[in-house]
Image (cartoon, grey):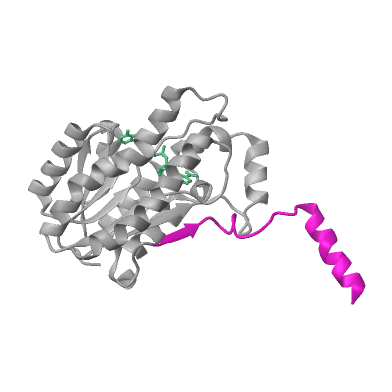
Amino acid sequence: MDTAGCAIVTGAGSGIGRACARRLGAAGLAVAALDANGEAAAETAAAVPGAAAFTADVTDETQVATAVGEATARFGSPKVLVNAAGIIVRKTLRESTVEEWRRVLDVNLTGYFVVLREVIPRMAAGGGGSIVQIASIAGHTGYGFSSYTAAKGGVLALTRQLAAELAVDGIRINSVSPGVVHSGLNRDTLSTPEIHAATVANTPVGRIGEPDDIAAAVAFLAGPDAGYITGTDLVADGGMISTIHWGEAGAQLHSFHAREQ
Ligand SMILES: NC(=O)c1ccc[n+]([C@@H]2O[C@H](COP(=O)([O-])OP(=O)(O)OC[C@H]3O[C@@H](n4cnc5c(N)ncnc54)[C@H](O)[C@@H]3O)[C@@H](O)[C@H]2O)c1
């Protein structure tokens, strides 16, 4: 990885963003840990040598412009951006208010745009770099929560759209689609035994993901080994959306086959 310059990580105060900050810091990049929760961002920065914390709500253009400007003044032009700040509202379409829908789209999609708009010119001026957007398997398949699924589908489309637009500036852009990962986002659901068990049962590798599983994929896409990869999505979900989950009927299907032989 080109370690000159800095990595800006949004949502760096928790979960996947924090793990990305740690990974990129360990790879030698100066990390700007950005989060709406300033205390959480400061905790991350304290755990990553040479990192600094920046408090900004990604939906607020002024706060983002100030934070990205300060990070660039301190560390030099951004070489890596990880867009990870996100929220979820677990409601069906009929249960959702317009306000809740707008907030989810605002943070999870427009927030990515607001940060991209500030970072891209600085990254281009510094000779290019690599952007990784945290999407979700919810952008590939239905997942139960319309606003979240719509926002993540938007992230996948935006990432593809920008590949050609940014290539002229030496910038690659890709996304990672996590499956179900232990983090602040789903601490509530995964602490429910039935949901935990159903999640493991629907994950072929047999366990729930950890933030560092996702950070490893992000670090790969951000680094030189992915130098010929842009405009694509890397699903990191333990196989969850790779298959139809038959449950116990799967064993029966195989036994039918065995009987025929
Ligand atoms: N955990 C999962 O299972 C999972 C699966 C797929 C995708 N994701 C995505 O991964 C990303 C990271 O989420 P996580 O799972 O680590 O959750 P998390 O709740 O642990 O971390 C999210 C972080 O984003 C910050 N944040 C929220 N709104 C913000 C805003 N408006 N401005 C700035 N910061 C804000 C929070 O303060 C928090 O520190 C999100 O985009 C999420 O949608 C998570």
Instruction: Check the picture and name the quadrant holding the C terminus.
Output: bottom right
Picture coordinates of residue 171 (x, y %)? 23, 62
> Considering depth in this image, is 163 or 54 the residue closer to the camera?
163
Picture coordinates of residue 21 (x, y %)? 30, 50
Q: How many labels does the image show?
A: 0
Do we see residue 12 in this rendering? no
Do we see residue 99 in this rendering? yes
- When the figure is inspected, residue 190 is found, relative to residue 175, above or below; the finding is above
Picture coordinates of residue 24 (x, y %)? 28, 57
The segment highlighted magenta reads 232-261
- When the figure is inspected, residue 80 is found, relative to residue 10, above or below; the finding is below
Picture coordinates of residue 211 (x, y %)? 43, 50
Instruction: Check the picture and name the quadrant holding the N terminus.
Output: bottom left
235 in magenta: yes
> Considering depth in this image, is 157 or 27 the residue closer to the camera?
157
- When the figure is inspected, residue 92 is found, relative to residue 76, above or below; the finding is above
Seen as rendered, the residue at the extreme right is 259
* Residue sitting at x 62%, y 54%: 203
Left or right relative to 143: residue 212 = left
Quarter of the view holding residue 159: bottom left
* Residue sitting at x 44%, y 45%: 152
* Residue sitting at x 82%, y 65%: 254
Seen as rendered, the residue at the extreme left is 73
Left or right relative to 56: residue 95 = right
- When the figure is inspected, residue 81 is found, relative to residue 104, above or below; the finding is below
